[in-house]
Amino acid sequence: MKLLIVESPAKSKTIEAYLGSEYHVEASMGHIRDLSIKGKGGFGVDINNNFKPEYVILDEKKAVVQKLIDYAENAEHIYLATDPDREGEAISWHLQEVLNQDPSKVSRIVFNEITKKAVVEALQNDRQVDINLVHSQESRRILDRIIGFRLSSLLQQKIGSKSAGRVQSVALKLVVEREKEIEAFNSEEYWDLFAVVSKGDVELKAKYFGKEEKHQLKSEQEANKVLEELQDAKYIVDKIEKKERKKSSKPPFITSTLQQDAGARYHYNAKRVMAIAQRLYEGIDLGSERVGLITYMRTDSIRLSEDFISDAKKYITKKYGSGYYKGVKKKSSKNNQHIQDAHEAIRPTSIERTPESIKEYLSLEEYKLYTLIYNRAISSLMSDALIEDTDVFIKANDNYFTLAGERTLYDGFMKIYQETSIDEIDDLGNLPELSLNEELNLISLTPEQKFTNPPHRYTEARLIRKMEELGIGRPSTYALTMETLRLRSYVNMQSRTFVPTDQGRLTSEQLDLFFSSIINIKYTAEMENILDEISEGTRIWHVEVAKFYDTFAPLIENARDNMVKLYPKQTDEFCPECGLPLLIRRGPFGEFTACSGYPRCKYIKKVKKPDPVKTGVECPLCHEGELVERINARGRTKGAKFYACSRFPSCRATYSGLPNGEICPVCNGPMITTSEGVRCGNEKCKSLKVKKDK
């Protein structure tokens, strides 16, 4: 009997179907060992002996390990088939150490897809465990343990924060800095002027450009002056500019781009994307067979195998025509210059398994993600699309308005894959055929007051893209980082964007004050490169860990001596239940007062909320309650005044200003009075600002 060990039961079930009775497939259920909590600082390493680690079997894995040992004793040969990355290599090494078999009896196999062909080929090309990959993962784990134990413990004692991390804390810093940019942003007024013109039955919305040069209207007075100049004007097509451009397909998905695209299209967070992809990778029962549908989903390589390229060429040529095939485009990924480039991009394991042909075997979310991966991989090899951009200048007296449109002359890769953007971009449509000197009919002329917007907050997709651009983290860390920020209560989610909590701000600011030399973008990205070089054998792992520790240790001691201890704070009150002093502590939602005898005494002082200020204005939504003045307690508008119905939660009407009895001419909603003037109270109304106080 030959023993083959993988990580998950789902994977073992798929592989077992490919191999004959001479093979037995078992799952390790992930990692079986971790660093102990012995030694200086409880790091589980001997700092004075080149950071030699001491590992212990995880309590919950002892039964699994014993079962694997029993099978190994009777096995003719043992194949370690854990995931094809550093983490998987480390798990294989731990298994090899724990099973304690003759080295000639144990070998490592890797495959990027779980198909019969891939598994059989891997068995024919077995090798020894790559100790450089193991050292790279080991170094990352030791660094995370040192930071996690020393820095997290310090923050818990001093400011009540739950944890800090090498990548996590830099991601938090990005979120906090973006929020500060938003708060410091000074919104400026500007006006757009739109002329709705028509050609026959087709209406076109042209935007004011200026006179000879482009000019932005800064005030209502400027807008009114232009309106006066446009009285009795004729709207004549003065210039038509057409340009053709090629639009190339994007490369196949890597981990970060898959998370970004699925987030933009389906609003899936990174954790959900990876969970769905894991199922597609490990194997789906298709009735007649169980097979992995996609290649390994933790990768930052855009490489495709020659077999896949050959199959895709035949498929594209047969289905769409030879003109639709272009082949691999010369693009590179910033992070694919290291060991991960030995992997492939995320792609379907078979061209023949089209999304439609296996739809009945997939859940809706599996079908959506598989379709996305399938179409992106094939489209990456397809020909460029040809787009015609059109800019039309319409002259009205001495002023110009512009129309912009685009037309697809040749669809190319767009036949199967439409790109999305994680940023708001207006789609341009087709324009009707227009002729020079043609007069268009004016339907309406509308000025719109607008204000410049602050930078966008980070969604998961934007934050992952930023981390990738900066070289922070690796494919396996993105989803975990996003989740950790939420679990530690460092951020709240508001309309799918990250908003730092007070605790998140405090944590980032204290880290910046005492640990800016290591908790920063440059150092974190450089450490990722060092870990890559360790995996390639060009750096010695314990030397690099020692360099970090020698930098980190003095910073910790300085912070321990000088960081102000904010919590708990003493009070002059005593617990009404046990008589011990009450302390002010900090929790996920801010400060609270509780007994110093916790956990024996669990008394928490209740805070009486102030009565809301009545306005005497009837609720415009339910006409039963009265609007009351409230203060926003959290989020982007924390501390801002707003008005809500007194019948909340039965009525959820809220307004940023007080309704004044007027009705919006656009949506018939209530008009409200704010510090900026009078506007529609419906935040979704396109005429957000339709009337301004004089």
Image (spheres, rainbow, N blue to C red):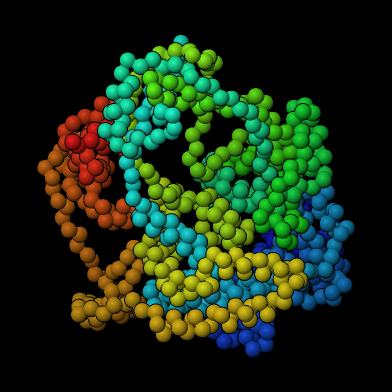
> At which x and y percent is residue 449?
31, 35
Side (left or right) of 88 relative to 306: left
Examine the rendered structure and indicate whether residue 569 appears above or below residue 342. Answer: below
Viewer-closest of 79 and 590: 590
Among all residues in the image, which is located at the extreme bottom?
48
For the image, the number of numbered tags is: 0
Q: Quadrant of the N terminus?
A: bottom right
Residue at the location (79% across, 47% down)? 305
Residue at the location (51% across, 70% down)? 519
Q: Quadrant of the C terminus?
A: top left
Residue at the location (41% across, 64% down)? 504
> At which x and y percent is residue 242?
59, 25
Residue 34 in which image quadrant? bottom right
Examine the rendered structure and indicate whether residue 152 appears above or below residue 474. Answer: below
Side (left or right) of 283 relative to 452: right
Residue 644 at least partly seen: no
Side (left or right) of 355 relative to 607: right
Residue 609 at least partly seen: yes
> At which x and y percent is residue 653?
25, 41
Examine the rendered structure and indicate whether residue 12 appears above or below residue 594. Answer: above
Examine the rendered structure and indicate whether residue 155 appears above or below residue 384. Answer: below
Viewer-closest of 437 and 609: 437
Residue at the location (72% across, 58% down)? 337
> At which x and y percent is residue 51?
65, 83
Among all residues in the image, which is located at the extreme left?
616
